[in-house]
Amino acid sequence: MSETDILLIDAYSQIFRCFYAIGALSNSKGQMTNAIFGFTRLMLKINADYPTPYGAFILDCGKPAFRLEIAPDYKANRPPMPPELRQQIPTIETLAEAFGWPKLVREGYEADDLLAAIAAEFADRTVKFISSDKDLAQIIDDRVKMLVPAAKGGGFTLRGTAEVREKFEVAPEQMIDYLALIGDTSDNIPGVPGVGPKTAAKLIAEHGSLANIFTRPELIGNPKLRQKIADNLELLKKNVKLISLNTEVRDKPWKNLDSLARKTPDWEQIRSICEEMELKSILRELPDSNAAPPEVKPEKFAPDLFGEQ
């Protein structure tokens, strides 16, 4: 990944993934450690394989007011964070900083918005970001690419423009319209009833965009589909606003590119945390001092095989 300048981590998407990938795990004090264990392995993997000069660990800060104004029930279907995970978050944030990652959070914005804003602002830099969120496919282009955690085998799958087209049958710049049509159950965004991925992709392929469909709905050949779109115009317009990422960030949590500089991991602090959490298998892999990072084998990082405690 030497050609990449900036690596961004959609923090909570990876924290939740670590938490649910590993069963109940705790130390002798009764502290839950499963998310901490998985997250530490994630950091080791990224540190070994993605030595970019710049990056950020980007966190959500509640539901943004501007989206709640559009849809008060936005993400209302999401359960609260499990207390077993919540108690591990402070340690995880400390670990991220110990691994040299600048931490970014801004009240009123979601991590996706901050991530998109950074990618847009530093337009002369190549960017990769780690996430599983399909909303973020809208910012992919020749310069910005996505690293999706692989379902098996560990590591990440690169998703660029060609991969977006292959997976969704639309271009990245058409993802907002595509998601507006089908909705997003994870965010409590309903789509047009009866319109699934195939129909949405076909509509966009035939008409180019929702804007074109709004202007000339009579061009939709299927009468039933034409009526469905006509009956849900306001829903679609609302969905477009909800799904579009906000890159106009006030009081940016980054000052300039240098504020995104990744630091050398503090292996002594990392070791201290791992000792406190009793992460024995990870302790065996850590270097003795602030030296070169250890090699992390992919099979130990697989989502279903994070390794034994």
Image: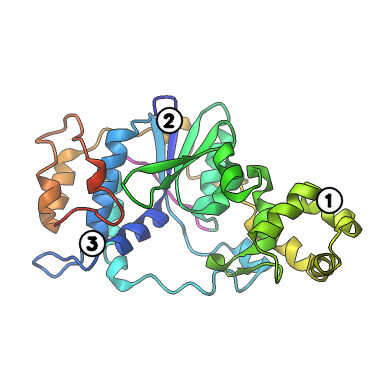
Q: Is residue 25 left or right of residue 223?
A: left
Instruction: State the CA–CA distance, disc 3 to disc 2.
Output: 33 Å
In the picture of the structure, the residue carrying the numbered disc 3 is 34
Magenta highlight range: 99-107
- Going from the N terminus, do you reach mark 3 or mark 2 first? 3
Report helix, strand or loop for mark 3.
helix
Neighbor class of circle 2 (other Cα within 10 Å; few <14, some 14-19, many 20+) is: few
Mark 3: amino acid: Asn
Q: Residue 253 in the image: state x and y as whole percent.
A: 48, 45
In this view, the mark in front (3 or 2): 3
Q: Is residue 13 magenta?
A: no
Q: Which residue is mark 2?
A: 258
Count of numbered badges drawn on the protein: 3
Taken as a whole, is the magenta stretch helix, strand or loop? Answer: loop
Instruction: Give the image quarter of residue 13.
Output: bottom left
Q: Position of residue 303 (x, y in %)?
A: 31, 54
Compute the Cα span from label 1 to label 3. 49 Å
| Position of residue 58 in the picture relative to residue 295 (left or right) | right
